[in-house]
Every structure is written in structure tokens, then in C-alpha cells.
Image (spheres, coloured by chain):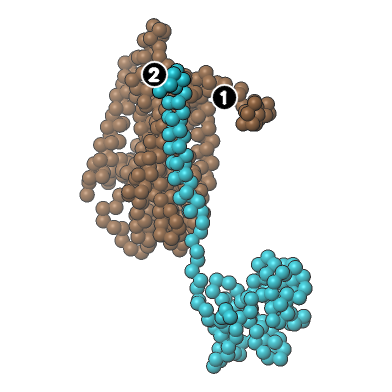
Amino acid sequence: MTVDQLSQPEPTRRRVIGFFLGGGLLASLASFIYPVLRYLVPPAVADLGGDEIVAAKLTELKLNSGKIFRFGNRPGLLIRTASGEYRAMSATCTHLSCTVQYRDDLRQVWCACHNGKYDLNGRNISGPPPRPLEGFEVQVRGDEIFVRRRREA
Amino acid sequence: MSPLRKVRDWLDERLQWDDLIAPLREKTVPLHRLSYWYFLGGISLFLFVIQVLTGILLLLYYRPGANEAFESVQYIMTRVQFGWLIRSIHSWSANLMIFTVFAHMFSVLFLKAYRKPRELTWVSGVLLLFLVMGFGFSGYLLPWNTLAFFATKVGTEITGQVPIVGKPMMIFLRGGEDVTGATLTRFFGFHVAVLPGIATVLLLLHLLLVQRLGMSIPPKLEVQWTANPAAKREMKFLPNFLLRELMAWYLALGVLGALAAVFPWNLGVKADPFVSAPAGIKPEWYFLFMFQTLKLIPSKVWFIDGEILGVLAFGLVALLWLLLPFLESDQPSHMKRWITGLAVFALAYTVGMSVYGYLAK
């Protein structure tokens, strides 16, 4: 041990105690904050309904009209075009997530929030929407119209 | 100058913070063999803060309403990460807080800290004690389980026994003739808005009074110290006492965490107004002494209903308790001893009846 160390024992001891005290306090603080942060994250909601659902009965939709249906936890839009074809797509606007609707006068999908427009394939054609709406597959079986998510290619 | 110091000085120039805490720097805490009792108020305050914080967290997931309340608490306990811990801490801390508040009150009583000029500190403290019991009573119903349902039914029914004002008060509390979802909505409002609002104001007043008047010295010691000022021993509040208080808080937190982790709070069975009350049903422990007393009073005393007599007696005791410091001042010293005797009796009665109520079938 050098003379230098002998002459200054107190500051070193104080620093060691301070280190343990501060470290202990920080560690316990972390142990309080960690559960709280985890608590704040809401548990994931199970996606109800699976991949395929019945969106409507065959007799339900007139020509040139649309219907909002429940697809899992989100709304979907089923359209019967003027020519009688069925189209289905997500009804959540890609701009700021309002629910879109079918406008029979425009023959387009329209979002009331910021005047976004999509064509009948869900492509964004006018207004602020940055991306097309997600399209779904439509199948008619018996008198029911089935909608399912498109398989990833 | 370090940047931290600069920020501090900048703020101090604007807030005059130093002037604000100057009285705290001069504040001292008397040192004697009973000094430990001075910690109880601080621990109660700490537990109250825990209640506010965990209460806010529970509000993120809790839903009031007869159809949702139980399920939402179940969701907190089973689905939300660490939800069981947050709720258990809230429940345990509530119980510990009621215990420390009672202990604080009795310590103030025995150390005679309510004497002039601290009468208002006592009054605000007793009101806070009543509020804390109100918090307990209203919070107990919120999970909407069977025990809570019947406890609330009985508790509000007792309120209804009070002559003249009882019945309207019961209907006000229940939000109707019976305990229903409407009661739950009201109790939720009381528990998270009305009571916290009143409690915050009273608490600030209580703390302000404690800071203004300083710590009370037990009478015997006060006489000794006045006769011989050299014998006086005290500790600075800042930082000496505060650091010790913080250690007590840390310890309280440890106890709380251990209790919550080892004995998570039960949820029970969802309340159903159309099933019978389960056998052995009892209120929370802090209402047991009143519950047991009411059970022991015969149904008719002379020409008065036993229940009414009990409720009126408790009301009268509560009022006297609130005004205790005013009863003692200006009394000769033998009368003051009589009041200490009353305090011993009150403690013995409360503890005795609680234990009796706990053990009774």
C-alpha cells in the first residue's frame, strides 16, 4: 500500500458505499418500472373469426351497392357492381383509418373523412390515401357469399 | 459551474424555491425513546401515493358496470402482464394504509400530540381516517364479487337505519332501492373522483399544519425539557429525519411487494343478486369491530331498535372522537388522565371486538 492511498482512505470508502447504495436504488427503481411498463402494453386481442367468413346472403345486395361486414376485428366492404360482380376489400382507409363506404352515384369507394377515393379494385385514385385497400377473395357458395383473405403468393 | 447547478439556479431565480423550503431546513424532530412513532404518518402518506399510482394503472383496464366489472378485473388478473401484481399491491397497500392510519391515530392519542395548538391537525386527521374507510368501503365493491356485493348491501342497509336521514342517504348511496349496477357506477365515481378530491385537499391541509406547527413533544418530556433545556435532544428534519423516513418507506415497499407477490389478492366469485349470501360472510377487518358490536346488541333495547341504537352510538362516538382535543383543553389534570384511560379503552375495545368478530362463527 502506498503512502498516497494511506493518507486518503475516506473518499475511497465513501465512493464504494455510494456506488453500492446508488446501484441498489437504481436496481430497485428498475424493478418497479419494468412491471409497470409491461403492464401498460395491452395484451394482444385474439383475431376472432379466422380466415373466412360469410359476408352476406346472395339476396342481400342490390346491383350497384355496398355493405360493411365484420371481418375479424376490422370492417370489410363488400360491393356488388352495376354489372353484378362481387368485390370485397378492407374497409379501413389507408390514409388515417376511417371506415370507407361505397358511393353508388360515383361508383367508387369513398372515404368521408378526407375525401379519399378508391376504384372498385380498391386502388387509391384520388385524395390523400397513400396505398390501395387490401383486397379479399370472394366466393359464392349456395346462397351465401364467402370472403377470405388472399393467400400470400 | 456544472450544468445541473445552472439549471437549478435558473429555476430558483424564477420559483424562489429556496425560500419555500427554508422552513424545512430549520425544522427539527425531537429525539426520544418514542420518536419512532413519528414515522407512521409518513408511511401512511407513502402508501396513499402508492394507492394513487396503482389506482391510475388499474383505471387503464377496469370497466365499471355490473356486466363488465368482474370480467375486467379477471382480465387484469389473468391476461394483462403484471396485472395481478398491480392489483395485489393496490389491495394490500389499501389494507396496510388503513392499519398505519389507525396506528398513527392511536400514537397521536397516546403521545397527546393533539393538544393546543394542534387541534385542527387532529380534526383533519380524523376526517382523513373516515375518508380512508370510505375508500375501503367503496373500493371493495368495484370487483363486483359475491362478498363485495353482500358487504355493500349490509353496509348501506346500516346507513338506512339512521332515523329520518338514513333512508334517503341509503338510496343516494345505492343509486336506487337496491344494490345494483347503478350502485357500482356510483361507488366507482366516489372511489376515483369524489373521495380522492376531498382527500387531496384535506391531506394538503394536514401536511401544511404539521409543517407549520412542527412535531409535538410528549407532555412529560416537554416539562423536563423546559425545566432543563440542556437535556433537549433533536434531529434536523432535512436531511436526517427525511432520510430515515425514506428508509422506512423503502422497508414498507419491501413488505408490500412481498405480500403482493406471495399472497396475490383473490378475486372471488362474480356477484349474483339472486343467490343466497354465503355462510360466514364478514366485512373487511377494519369494519369488524362495528360489525361485531351490532351483532351483539339485542334486537330491542327498551323501546329502541338495537340496530338504530348501535348506529347512533357509533355516530356519536365518531363525533366525539373528531372533537376530542376540544374536550380535553381547559380541563383539570385528573380529567386529562381520564381521557387517556378512554383512549386505552378505545384501543382495547377496537382490537378486542375485531378479534372476537374474526373468530366468531
Amino acid type of the residue that numbered disc 1 sits on in the rendered structure: Ile
Q: Position of residue B327 (x, y in %)?
A: 40, 23
**Residue depicted at 39% across the width and 51% down the height:** B152
Residue A30: percent from the left, percent from the top?
A: 47, 44
Whether B208 is drawn above or below A103: the answer is above
Image coords of residue B139 (percent x, y):
43, 49
Q: Residue at 70% x, 87% y: name it.
A: A81
Residue at the spot of label 1: B21
Expressed as whole percent of the image width and height from the top left, the position of residue B310 reads 33, 40
Image quarter of residue B229: top left
> Is the residue marked by circle 2 packed among few (<14), some (14-19), or many (20+) residues within 10 Å?
some
Q: Which chain is brown?
A: B
* Quarter of the N terminus of chain B within the rendering: top right
Residue at the outermost front position = A2
Describe residue B257's horizontal placement relative to residue B350 as left or right.
Answer: right
Residue A87 or residue B29, whichever sits in front = A87
Q: In the image, what residue type sits under mark 2?
A: Leu
Considering the numbered disc 1 on the image, is that residue within a helix, a strand or a loop? Answer: helix
The residue where tag 2 is placed is B31
Colour that chain A carries in the picture = cyan
Say which of B98 and B297 sits in front: B98
Residue in front for this viewpoint, B226 or B76: B76
Q: Position of A96 compared to B342: left or right?
A: right
Instruction: Measure the alpha-carbon separation of dots 1 and 2.
Output: 22 Å
Q: Which of marks 1 and 2 is nearer the N terminus?
A: 1
